[in-house]
Image (cartoon, helix red, strand yellow):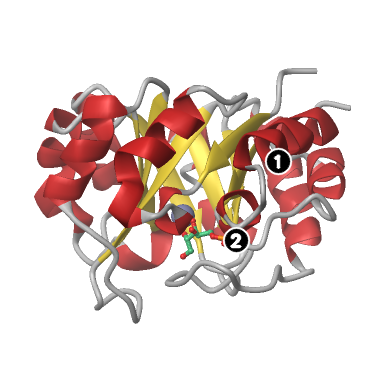
């Protein structure tokens, strides 16, 4: 079985000590940096934008996994590539011409991801799954860190895994929202490959030990 990855979400970092928290992730067992960009339109919150992402990528030494919670993301695909994004994930619900958006992300040399809100059926991806490097299943309603995990996610992970297998695709399944040591193992058993964790990591007493703990559970 392939190695399961942990992606700490920088949304939960201490922005007054951003470099310190980035170095903390660099020096941990984490695999990716998960970066949440919110526009206050697609989601009812604004996180941060390009200058902050630039500051993050200047110091970050691991895969930069950018999750766009913005309307009309096509406007900024090139900019996110220039800022050092390795993965660029857009929301299914925010893209009228999703196939075109996915091709545009790949044309800029990035891995293409699509995120699904908790209410969006897996079947919506049937005709595009083979084009996707990553599907991000939202296990909370996007917009805020620190929310409770939605239990229906387990069933969605299983459905998505079946779809990926049926199509012979190599798409990674990422879970985002409310991930803790209580659900990681069950998520991986259902088919998850990448676990995003924000508050559970950064609000713990020892974030690096928490990352190692999650990673060990995910790969047990
Ligand atoms: C929510 C974001 C998540 C968030 C996860 O809209 O997409 O990435 O940072 O935070 P936790 O792990 O605290 O639920
Ligand atoms: Zn996210």
Task: Pick the residue in front: 61 or 123.
Answer: 61
174 or 130: nearer the viewer:
174
Front residue of this view, candidates 24 and 109: 24
Q: How many marks?
A: 2
Q: Does any portion of residue 88 appear in the rendered image?
A: yes
For the N terminus, the quadrant is: top right
- Does label 1 or label 2 sit earlier along the sequence? 2
Quadrant where the image shows the C terminus: top right
CB at disc 2 and ligand 1 closer than 8 Å: yes
Q: Nearer the viewer, mark 1 or mark 2?
A: 1
Residue drawn where x is 82% and y is 54% of the image: 183
Secondary element at image label 2: loop
- Residue 163: x, y in percent? 69, 42
- Mark 1 sits on what residue? 210
Residue 46: name its quadrant: bottom left
Residue appearing at x 66%, y 43% in the figure: 206
**35 relative to 166, above or below:** below
* Disc marking residue 177: 2
Q: Please provide percent x and percent y for residue 87.
A: 37, 33
Label annotation for residue 149: none
């Amino acid at each position: 079985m392939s190695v399961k990855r942990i992606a700490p979400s920088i949304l939960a970092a201490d922005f007054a000590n951003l470099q310190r928290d980035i170095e903390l992730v660099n020096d941990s067992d984490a695999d990716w940096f998960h970066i949440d960009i919110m526009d206050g339109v697609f989601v009812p919150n604004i996180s941060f934008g390009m200058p902050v992402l630039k500051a993050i990528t200047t110091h970050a030494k691991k895969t930069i996994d950018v999750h766009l919670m913005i309307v009309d993301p096509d406007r900024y695909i090139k900019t996110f590539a220039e800022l050092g994004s390795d993965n660029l994930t857009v929301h299914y619900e925010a893209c009228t011409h999703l196939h075109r958006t996915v091709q545009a992300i790949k044309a800029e040399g990035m891995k293409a991801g699509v995120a699904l809100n908790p209410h969006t059926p897996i079947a919506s991806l049937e005709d595009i799954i083979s084009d996707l490097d990553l599907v991000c299943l939202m296990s909370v309603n996007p917009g805020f860190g620190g929310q409770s995990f939605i239990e229906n996610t387990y069933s969605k992970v299983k459905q998505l895994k079946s779809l990926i297998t049926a199509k012979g695709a190599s798409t990674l399944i990422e879970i985002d929202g409310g991930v803790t040591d209580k659900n990681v193992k069950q998520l991986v058993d259902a088919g998850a490959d990448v676990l995003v964790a924000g508050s559970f990591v950064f609000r713990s007493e020892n974030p690096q030990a928490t990352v190692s703990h999650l990673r060990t559970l995910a790969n047990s």
